[in-house]
Image (cartoon, helix red, strand yellow):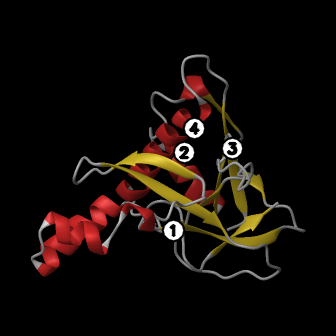
Amino acid sequence: MDHHIDIDVLRDPEFPAHQLMSALYAKLHRALAAHNSTRIGVSFPGFSLRVPHLGTRLRLHGSLAALSTLMASDWMTGMRDHVTLTQPMHIPENAKHRVVRRVQVKSSPERLRRRLMRRHNLDAQEARQRIPDELARLAKLPYVQLRSASTGQSFRLFIDHGPAQSHVTEGDFNAFGLSQVSTIPWF
């Protein structure tokens, strides 16, 4: 993992940046899944936790060969008018490293109630008593809005950037370009 490509979402009066980022990320996810890629990671250099958002830059990390193979495919069809992108560039030598991972949040009381009803054969009132609305934990992490290819349901993919660290942890990335343990260069 010695190269990166920056993809910046352009301002558009018709589509907010987070909507374009979600569309771009959905296309990337489909491409990574189609290529069975485990060697490309992602980061969002402009992310913020204060007002949770991912910013307007998606950074792809990987080897020159892995990034070139991905970019030779047509995964960005329909997005090229909404983004600018760089050629693959070397990672700066003084880069730190960090884990960028998916966080699954159990924030929907209604979903938790349905699950409880199904598993314990409870009615809706009993489930509501056990899981009141006040138990909802709202994630304060940035996310992209995606649609499941298998179920068609829309969901939020919450993304956490771990603390910067000085050492590299090598490993695979999932079809979202995320990992629970592998690091990406951070600069």
| 54 lies above or below 64 | above
Per the image, the residue denoted by label 3 is: 55
Q: Residues within 10 Å of mark 1 (few under 14, many from 20)?
A: some
- Give me the C-alpha separation between circle 3 and circle 1: 18 Å
The image position of residue 79, as x and y in percent, is 51, 30
Quarter of the picture containing the N terminus is bottom right
- Give me the C-alpha separation between circle 2 and circle 3: 22 Å
- Give me the C-alpha separation between circle 1 and circle 2: 27 Å
Q: Amino acid at mark 4?
A: His
| Marked residue nearer the N-terminal end (1 or 2) | 2
Per the image, the residue denoted by label 2 is: 71
How many marks the image carries: the answer is 4
Q: Secondary structure at mark 1?
A: strand
Nearer to the camera, 143 or 21: 143
Q: Is residue 50 left or right of residue 43?
A: right
Q: Is residue 67 left or right of residue 108?
A: right
Q: Amino acid at mark 2?
A: Met
Q: Residue at x 27, y 71 (%)?
A: 129
- Give me the C-alpha separation between circle 4 and circle 2: 22 Å
Per the image, the residue denoted by label 1 is: 103
Quarter of the picture containing the C terminus is bottom right
Q: Residues within 10 Å of mark 2 (few under 14, many from 20)?
A: some
| Marked residue nearer the N-terminal end (3 or 4) | 4
The image position of residue 45, as x and y in percent, is 74, 52
The image position of residue 53, as x and y in percent, is 65, 47
Nearer to the camera, 173 or 35: 173
